[in-house]
Image (cartoon, helix red, strand yellow):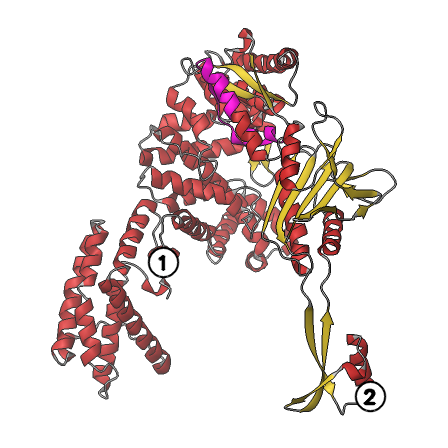
Amino acid sequence: MADLLLELFSEEIPARMQARAAEDLRRLVTDRLVENGLTYAAAAAFATPRRLALSLTGLPKVTPDTAEERKGPRTDAPQPAIEGFLRSTGLTLDALERRADKKGEVFFAVIRRPGRPASEVIAEAVEHAVRNFPWPKSMRWGPGSLRWVRPLHRIVCVLSDEAGASVVPVEIDGIRSGDQTEGHRFMARGPFRVAHFDDYAAKLAAHRVVLDPEERAHRIWHDATQMAFALGMEVVEDKGLLAEVAGLAEWPVVLMGEIGAEFLDLPPEVLQTSMREHQKFFSVRNPKTGRIERFVTVANIEAPDGGAAILKGNRRVLAARLSDAKFFWENDRRKVAGQGIAGIEAMAKPLDSVVFHQKLGSQAERIARIAALAREIAPAVGADPDLAEQAAKVAKADLASAMVYEFPELQGVMGKYYARAAGLPEPVANAAEAHYRPLGPSDAVPSEPVSVAVALADKIDMLTGFWAIDEKPTGSKDPFALRRAALGVIRTVLENDIRLRIKPLLTLGDDLHYLQWASSAFAKVDEVRRSICAELGIEVEDFDSAKRLIEKNFRSDRREARLADLLNTKMADIPDPRDDLLTFLADRLKVALRDQGIRHDVIQACFDLGGQDDLVLLVNRVRAAQEFLATEDGANLLTAYRRASNIVRIEEEKDGVEYSMPPDPMFAEGAEEAALFEALDAAEPAIAAALRAEDFTAAMAAMARLRLPVDAFFDKVTVNAPNQILRRNRLCLLTRIRQVMRQVAVWDAIEG
């Protein structure tokens, strides 16, 4: 067995591309080798700023011999058919085999291919991988046609076994493979030879290159945290920045510097964002004060002065960046300081001319809708309506600030600081930051009542607005992050245990978007347009001008009033987008609860009852239903429910009638049938009372008591009795079983 070492050595590879590139190299090479019969035991890929490396172990020295059988024409087939088969196989007639077949004797070709040397297969795989590498961006250089992320300088391709190492010959646009590579650009100049992967990794380390990106990241974080600990400080964790910085240095050297005293009063988030985005610095926090007081940078060289000159240059550049941030901060704060709501509204004034969406108006109009919604939501979440409305009006004011224009990721955070500077109540300031949450599955939801009201209003306005203009998510496309907004509504309601009816809020949100919804509906349903025009006696081309009359608040003119009446009548025939939106929320609820082990079909069974827009109540019902189905009584009763449903469905289709009349107990024959009537009479009010009390466990227990009488009925009673009166009564009795059980859930939705 042999091992392969492959290295592609180039100019600097952008850090954001390195991890994906290492995986692409492993995939492209190994897939090609396996396709050509060369298997391997293990593969590992690595990336540094200047190289991609691949190690394969357990490679055979040659691929196995192969034999392929092809069935040909019958031996008595016309000569042209036989000659065509010979050409396709590359064999002569005497090399074919004759075999008996059900249709007679036929020719068979056995095509044998001898194994190929591993080096030959590897060379083809490497060239294919290099020429077809999926870089997000690539370039050409020199006279060749090869494209790479940066100019490619060397290819190391070495196959080694117990007898030694040999170079696999590969040539791509004049670049020939060899066994020489280079170490660190500055601290270990000049090429050196390598024989196998262990030799390669060891010599790279000796030449100031850490090959493994995880090892580089670990070294950076260890050294940074140790430096901070020695000063009684802590490094602010940032996994994304750590991965990026580990891709910028082949030999990371951690240095810590001080931030100028004139910048220490800037908000910590401003310092952290500025240093991360512009300088790739880690922030070092004083846990006693909460301030960011130092920074950590990673150099790619061991400087003879211990990094003093590097830190001096970094501090100078950082001071220039932070001077800009300080100017933005002070200028923005000066506009609002001590001026209350008036100062924030003045800051937000430019949003009047900022378009949120062409069909949904400006940011200012959106803020007004959110404020109206927040006021309505506030009582249900325990918030003061006036504070909720005020918070909604100021929550997005920082979008017009210079600081957020420079650092968009600080939206909300700066709103909190500006609201505090204006002297607004703390719940209002907190809502400016918290109403964007949750930003992802690991982000916390808002918990303060005012923040919850504004967060829900913000997300519901997004959902109802884009549903109104028919801009819904499709497949994998969700340009307005509506799935995230829906999950945000669900998580906020459930994690705060808020008893809230969602559909009335969607209705209110839709009222705010009424004209957009009406316009969208008219555009989609041309029959409505033609019908209204015919009823009013106007031409279709005059419709748009007539419709605009509606958009002037339904003035008193009789013609306009008639058009308004027609609009309301005709729109009733168009599917209500709120129902579709509620179904979308139910689908997102399935996603949200999937990780908790809750079955999607149980959610659907409860949702199908209709009116299930109290999410907390719905989830409680779903949990109780799933627990019930996990019991023996639940499983058997579900089987009986399906049996009753199937019998009724089949007989209704056969007879062309519905068996939905109340069954009469006077026609009961035998103890089992009478017992079922009694059980249903007892269970129905018991289940209804438990549901009114929101005691779903009790409702399931009452339903479970139906199991034995239902089983006995099916065991002893013939539903399709010869007596038609008994048959109809018994079919209606089966319908009643369904009706009683459907008080809890629509069990037809349960799968399996």
Residue at numbered disc 2: 79
Is any atom of residue 418 visible in this view?
Answer: no
Residue 573 location, x and y as percent? Answer: 47, 58
Q: Which amino acid does label 1 sit on?
A: Asp
One can see residue 607 in this view = yes
Residue type at tag 2: Gln
Counting labels gives 2
Return the mark for residue 608.
1
**SS for dot 1:** loop
The single residue placed furthest to the front in the displayed view is 163
| Magenta region, residue range | 222-250
Residue at 35% across / 63% down in the picture?
A: 750
Membership of 649 in magenta stretch:
no
Neighbour tally class for label 2: few under 14, some 14-19, many 20 plus, Cα within 10 Å: few
Along the line of sight, the residue nearer the viewer: 455 or 341: 455
Q: Which numbered disc, 1 or 2, marks the residue closer to the eye? A: 2
Q: Residue at x 67, y 60 (%)?
A: 35
Q: In this view, does 462 lie above or below 206?
A: below
The N terminus: image quadrant = bottom right
Instruction: Out of 510 and 604, give the one closest to the viewer.
Output: 604
Q: Is residue 374 left or right of residue 150?
A: left
